[in-house]
Image: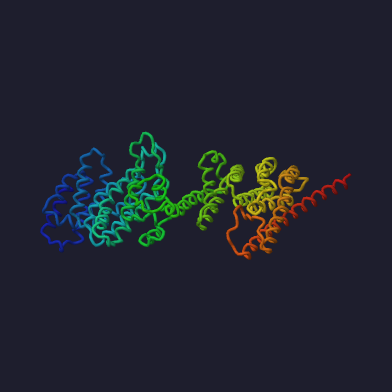
Amino acid sequence: MAVDELQAIIQRCQILEEADFKGEDFSLFQVAGQKCLEDGYAAQLLEVIQNEKNKVIIKNMGWNLISPLVRCIFMYKQEDDKREHCLKILDQLAQLCNPKELFLGLLEQIEQASGEQACQTVMLLLQPLQTVLLKLQNKKAYSLGLSLAMIMNQLTPLPVPYTKQQIQEDKLGLCQCCNAVVDFTKPFVNEVIKNMEKSSEYNDMELKEELLKFCMKCLKYPLLTAQLEQLEGIEEHPFRHFATEIIVSAVKINCNVCKSSGNQEFADIERKNSADSLACLSYLMFVQHFGIDCFPMVFSPSYLLQCNMTHIEVLLKSCLLRMEDNSLLHQYLELRDFINVPQDLVKVMTLCPIEHLRKKSLHILQLFIDKFDTEGKYTLFRCLLKTSNHAGVEGYIIKNIKDQIHLSLTRACDNIWFTGHHLISLLDLVLLLPEGAETDLLQNSDRIMASLNLLRYLVIKDCESDNQTGVWTTLAKIEQNFLKPLHVGLNMSKAHYEAEIKNKKENRRVCSVTVSGEKMPAMTTEMQLQVLHSALFTFDLIESVLARVEELIEVKIKAVMDENNVKT
């Protein structure tokens, strides 16, 4: 009988000193204890473990029972008394065993768990693992980090529940497990906070770093992809609760966690973790307001915006890069957010005083454009041309239109959106001067040059006989709305600036000069002349391209007329 075998081994070991225990004793104890569990004698095994006389034996050998104990716990049903006895044995082992040996045994069980049992195993072993870690002194931070890393390795392959039904069912136990892990870390978080309160010079970075690394991992998984909106019928949303706990812990440990740039204490941790985590943290705090009450409100709104711009970029870029080009359906633009995002990016591009953020916004805008199908690109171009109110942005959009026309003309595919009547409708927005001949040509030079380059491309690539783009059909309108007013505007602008140059040279102030919509600031005469000559150079450049476009149109029309004459 298994219990008799165990008692025999116990009696033999009771008369031995701790130092005299041999490898054979460990093996016999493990086999006998395992057999007791498997044969249903968990109650008798519990009595042996609780016997004060066996304290030294259990301290040294008890950790060997962890593996069979875990198997038996999952084998028995919830209401089975044997399962309850096994759980009490687990609790006793956590109290009595050598912490170092038991720690390794518990981690081994977590590592071996997989699939549907991963969360259940983690939740089962969290309490004894916490008990053991709190006993460790010298290696506490290292052991905690090892434990949390092992736990996250087991959880990250699991799919994150997203729908209301999935969250309520919690089939794999991930929702429950995540919150259990947060509770598991609380004694260690409290220890760090307590020590920081005792001394402002508290610099035990190891425990802080391990806890912050865990928080950053949680922000990437599961929170980056989790559904965090409040769902009707779910009183306490598990992921919302989890997010709050993680952020509160992170902020209490390091109040500068959101202001990671330039924060030396956080620099090493940031380098080792994905920027996605910090972007998620920023979103959860400043959009969802999780844990915002714990955040020190000493930073100005403009400074917080500057810090968060990087995180906004990361979130957008991360989402966009996961998608293939041309895969986003145009119907998404019916949703307000899909129109608001590019318009907000344009505002950053044109209004933000920080150069690298303007460049990043431009890069993300192009990524955003690339992901839409052709009808989506067409719709987006029309929207941005109407709303951007910035010549540089309009010039950039016109260049994108030219690229799409080029793809339509060079690929063997029927693209109705950048040829024919759809394109003509789009060209009506492109090939015109906003205020006719009185348009500020200098301020609108980027748009005008892009429009002229587009028209030049259309005239060269699209033969009048083919007229795939429809440009030859609408040429009279283009001349009336764009080319003729541009001629008049150039003559007026050049005369105005030439007169001002003459006045400057003669030191007379007759004409007031406005450059790009703003009066020129106080400058030396030489500096003002330099600006005025630069404006004239821009006008000459526009005039040169305009002349080339008109020349190409004339040559093409003459060639067609000659061809018709030959035929007749």
Is residue 384 in view from this perspective? yes
**Picture coordinates of residue 198 (x, y %)?**
23, 58
Q: Is residue 490 left or right of residue 47?
A: right
Q: Is residue 472 left or right of residue 507?
A: right
Q: Looking at the picture, tell me which residue is in the foreground, 254 or 73.
A: 254
Residue in the image at 22% along x and 49% along y = 90
Q: Looking at the picture, tell me which residue is in the foreground, 182 or 469.
A: 469
Q: Looking at the picture, tell me which residue is in the foreground, 294 or 121.
A: 294
**Picture coordinates of residue 204 (x, y %)?**
28, 61
Q: What is the quadrant of residue 16 in the picture?
A: bottom left
Q: Is residue 279 left or right of residue 251?
A: right
- Coloring applied to the structure: rainbow
**Picture coordinates of residue 313 (x, y %)?**
48, 52
Residue in the image at 26% along x and 61% along y = 139
**Picture coordinates of residue 105 (x, y %)?**
26, 55
The quarter of the rendered structure image containing the C terminus is top right
Q: What is the quadrant of residue 62 in the picture?
A: bottom left
Residue lying at the far top in this picture: please name it. Answer: 233
Q: Is residue 561 left or right of residue 399?
A: right
Residue in the image at 72% along x and 48% along y = 485
Q: What is the quadrant of residue 523 in the picture?
A: bottom right
Count the numbered circles shown: 0
Is residue 149 in view from this perspective? no
